[in-house]
Image (tube, coloured by chain):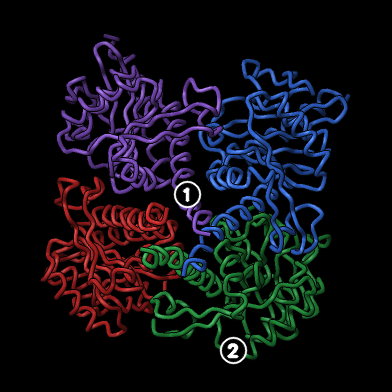
Chain colours: A purple, B red, C green, D blue
Amino acid sequence: MKDSNFMDNDFAQHASGIVSLAKDLHSRGWLLGTSGNLSAVVERDPLRLAITPSGADKGELVGERILLIDEEARVVGNAESIAGKPSDESPLHVALVKAQKAGAVVHTHSVWVTMLSDVYGDDGGLAIEGYEMLKGLRGVTTHLHREWIPIIENSQDMRALAESITETVAKYPGSHAILLRRHGMYTWGRDLNEAKRHVEILEFLFEAVGRTRELRVVTTTR
Amino acid sequence: MKDSNFMDNDFAQHASGIVSLAKDLHSRGWLLGTSGNLSAVVERDPLRLAITPSGADKGELVGERILLIDEEARVVGNAESIAGKPSDESPLHVALVKAQKAGAVVHTHSVWVTMLSDVYGDDGGLAIEGYEMLKGLRGVTTHLHREWIPIIENSQDMRALAESITETVAKYPGSHAILLRRHGMYTWGRDLNEAKRHVEILEFLFEAVGRTRELRVVTTTR
Amino acid sequence: MKDSNFMDNDFAQHASGIVSLAKDLHSRGWLLGTSGNLSAVVERDPLRLAITPSGADKGELVGERILLIDEEARVVGNAESIAGKPSDESPLHVALVKAQKAGAVVHTHSVWVTMLSDVYGDDGGLAIEGYEMLKGLRGVTTHLHREWIPIIENSQDMRALAESITETVAKYPGSHAILLRRHGMYTWGRDLNEAKRHVEILEFLFEAVGRTRELRVVTTTR
Amino acid sequence: MKDSNFMDNDFAQHASGIVSLAKDLHSRGWLLGTSGNLSAVVERDPLRLAITPSGADKGELVGERILLIDEEARVVGNAESIAGKPSDESPLHVALVKAQKAGAVVHTHSVWVTMLSDVYGDDGGLAIEGYEMLKGLRGVTTHLHREWIPIIENSQDMRALAESITETVAKYPGSHAILLRRHGMYTWGRDLNEAKRHVEILEFLFEAVGRTRELRVVTTTR
């Protein structure tokens, strides 16, 4: 384990990055009504994760409210927030950090994700290919890439959801996001910057896919 | 009644919270053209409500313009605004504060609410269920929740509308909002923060419901 | 004529109001690409109008660039801008100020106005009624109001357009706006605040009318 | 070649203009996820171009990261960024600067461009005419103007794409933009201000064209 001063600095930096990204995504309408949550790995072994507290307005977040949790999603740090409770979905963040070796996880709730996760829910996922914007996803070097975004059914049993996410990542290790049906998106990255890039890229692509479905009807019914 | 200094502090805090929320909702396009109004309970017995004045541009609001009214919607405080007139819809705020024991009431005018209140108007309301975002509504713990949003006909008789709202709350005490047809939404909360959360959650859901109706046609006519 | 110091103060105030409103409307996407223009009456007799210069980026406007023109749309003041040229559409502003006795005129270019002015162009206008938001228009006291928005054909002959506007106002003196087909909206008010309110109210209504047309197809084709 | 102090001042000014425009376009959602790039001519002979680095978050850009490249797209200046790599699409900027004698080039990725470049891709372009907003394009003086926007197939071979752009400009010298299919838009101007104006005008027109296609179905299927 790192010494505690170093740890404190690291934690403060990650907390500040989380707050800044949360405000940004809230202003775009992807974290409305205290929905969604963000986390960043402060230490890998033992696992220490900076994470947003349950029920926070992401537009009014401050660094003092960010919590430090362990791999059991128990609060292990940040005295100022001792009264805070980590997000109920913390086990999903832990699962993704482990399965994807991610350094940051962002869970957003956008209108387009909510809709498409339902429209394509029975197919178990949706494929996006042929868009230049796909190159914004880590490791993708051509628009010819075919990105499979798995969709899993929503549930209030967070341990079961975490398992479902772990299985899905094992089945589709190359995917950059997972949708929960009528719920939202989980994406991740090596760090918060990469996770932010993935959120922007994927939200763009979902809007393009959704609007294209709307537009196609015109061609079809003419 | 509380002593007047304490009252002044309380009022100033609520006025400041109202101004900040009004600007935020105006920037999102939900309070355009001086439409909408916001209130917060300063004292419960006798009832004292801080409320936005009639005809104010919510993007340019200042605390000095917020009024203090009693349960008859008469101005009883805030000398700076003595020339101000409380919103014509003040009786609706009073009705909701009493019927729902709310600490804050927010009335917004969004495009999606305006449209859906008309499309579902003949049904007397619309049901929203199966969305994770529903958990942002007070007391809701699962996406399986079925939220009934009553819609009442619009009118310029504010006393009649206030009665209609009181009856509707009595009939659907578990609902978190009421729509006025082709007019707007009333929602509320224990305090301004909760009312803000409800506005964001409900506007998100109305947009998702509206856009899904648009998207469905594609599937249907293919 | 007022004395020149008084005039300068008045002009500076109106110029500052125009700049602030222009930035606001630009950020909402209603004055993109140097399109649109705004004016305010500084003096009535002889007519003196503060107006935006031709070709200005409304998001980068400064008060020094606002011009003072007379009823022939000739620049008569603001030495800093002596090189500036008033908007080609200045005669339309003068025509509206005279015909409607308006204190401010705002001409915006929004996507919804552009579309609806075309869809309803052959009908010579569109009627909007039954919306609470109509009460944001000067003198309207009920949602039952029927607002007729005349649409006139676009032209590059500004004198002819100005005449067409004068005739249209004479024919429909109760209307609060005129659309130029596939071009934009002219609205006005007693002062800049009222003109701003009219822009927000009307843009809201056009979006609601446009989206409702999109939504209706779902009902129709089911 | 200009002397180096003069050059430094010029470069710093262009870098600052690029940063400011990049942030603005990012906030509108046209440069999400590090997509897109901007350049401005600092010197014409030999060609020196200030350009955004590869992989930069346009909302977090700073002037120190802007690079100076030559006509072979090799970095020739800005010591602070020596580790930076110019955008892979730099050859396309160089090609446009030469073929159009442009002073600035902006490449954006918007949802509407992505969709329309696909819908009209098989036609090799789309024509836009009859809109007043067309007058925001350099040299256009009437809404009757017919703007042809060529669309070329996307590719990861940047030298081939640069040639394709050069050929397209030679074939349609009067066009103000080129779309890459399912990729994005290239537009340009005498300077950054004009390029910004062209982005705003064209994005407005693409949204209007796209939404009109959506709206038309209503009329058609009634």
Quarter placement of the C terminus of chain C:
bottom left
Residue B123 locus on image (x, y percent): 24, 71
> Is residue C104 at all visible to an observer of this figure?
no
Residue B152 locus on image (x, y percent): 24, 75
Distance from label 2 to label 1 (Cα)?
40 Å
The residue tagged 2 is C173
Q: Residues within 10 Å of mark 2 (few under 14, many from 20)?
A: few
B5 vs A24, nearest the viewer: A24
A45 vs A115, nearest the viewer: A115
Mark 1, chain letter?
Answer: A
| Residue in the image at 57% along x and 32% along y | D61
D184 vs C143, nearest the viewer: D184
| Residue in the image at 24% along x and 80% along y | B161
Q: Amino acid at mark 2?
A: Pro
Quarter placement of the N terminus of chain C:
bottom right
Say which element carries label 1: helix
| Residue in the image at 30% along x and 82% along y | B155
Say which element carries label 2: loop
A90 vs B131, nearest the viewer: B131
